[in-house]
Image (cartoon, grey):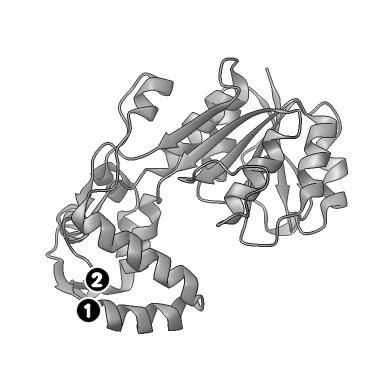
Amino acid sequence: MTKVLVIGANGSVGRHVVASLVEGGHEVRALVRDTAKAAPPAGVETVRGDLAVPESLAAALGGGVEAVYLMWPGIPVQPRVVELIAEHARRVVYLSTDVPDLADDEPPVIFHQEIERLIRKSGLGWTFVRAIDFAGNTLGWADQVRTGVVRWPYGRARRSLVHERDIADVAVRALTEDGHDGAKYLVTGPESIAHADLARIIGEELGTEVRWEELAPETAREQLTAAWGNAAFVESRLAAWESFSREPERVTDTVEQVLGRPARGFRSWVREHAEDFR
């Protein structure tokens, strides 16, 4: 059995990583910023640490930790975190996104590229789980779903949203089995589904009608910038959705190749989260 430190244990993927590791009989240590607010499964050790303060991770990495699951929040990259992981563990699985590799002299477009490059040069055994957008992002529509109308841009944009448990299951395999070093797993859902159909499926699983109302990109830009507070991110999302209305977001068979079973579909995710929409 492997002793694993889970960084991001309270996240939408990390909590499933913890649960799966426990089910597999592995020793799990969860890094959290506030142990008083942590509620891990029985048998999971919680330790306090903060990625913004790298030296706070030293104690969490001690005591025989062999593998680390790493999720990086939207804070400045701290190279010392990767250095500390390399000093204590032998393997890291990093939750990344669909990004191209970054050359040594190339400036990063997104922080995931910078962290991947640090990990590649660290001497660790590593696996990158490059996940497409989570199915859980549709919870951002919950208030609109309750009114029966989802107003959003690019209803024809076809997305391959992935169930968070599939991401976690791939990560756990890489954490606990040999044969995954150097892999860059692009994890997607089993099919691409248009935005408007995602809203319709949510309604069908809830037993109610949910209509789609197309929102002009200009209006969406204004509303999302006000809500998210990051104009550059909003622009990148709008550009991606526009491209997916012309060419669907890609679909991979990574889940089936790694786990030996099909990826979970969007309907199954909605059934599990139905109460979150009500």
Q: Amino acid at mark 1?
A: Ala
**Residue at 65% across / 49% down in the picture?**
114
Q: Quadrant of the C terminus?
A: bottom left
Which residue matches tag 1?
Answer: 216
Callout 1: SS = loop
Give the residue at the far front of this rendering. Answer: 105
Count the labels in the image. Answer: 2
In the image, is residue 178 above or below residue 266? above
Local crowd size for mark 2, using a 10 Å CA cut-off: few (<14), some (14–19), many (≥20): many
Residue at (64%, 29%) from the top-left corner?
A: 126
Specify the amino acid type for callout 2: Pro
Horizontal side of residue 13 vs 144, given as left or right: right
Residue 157, position as x, y percentages in the image: 22, 58
Q: Earlier in the sequence, mark 1 or mark 2?
A: 2
Please tell me whether residue 276 is drawn above or below residue 117 in the rendered image.
below
Q: Position of residue 190 (x, y in %)?
A: 27, 36
The answer to whether one can see residue 44 in this image is: no
Q: Nearer the viewer, residue 139 or 92?
A: 92
- Crowd rating for badge 1 (residues with CA inside 10 Å; few <14, some 14–19, many 20+): few
Quarter holding residue 276 = bottom left
- Cβ atoms under marks 1 and 2 closer than 8 Å: yes
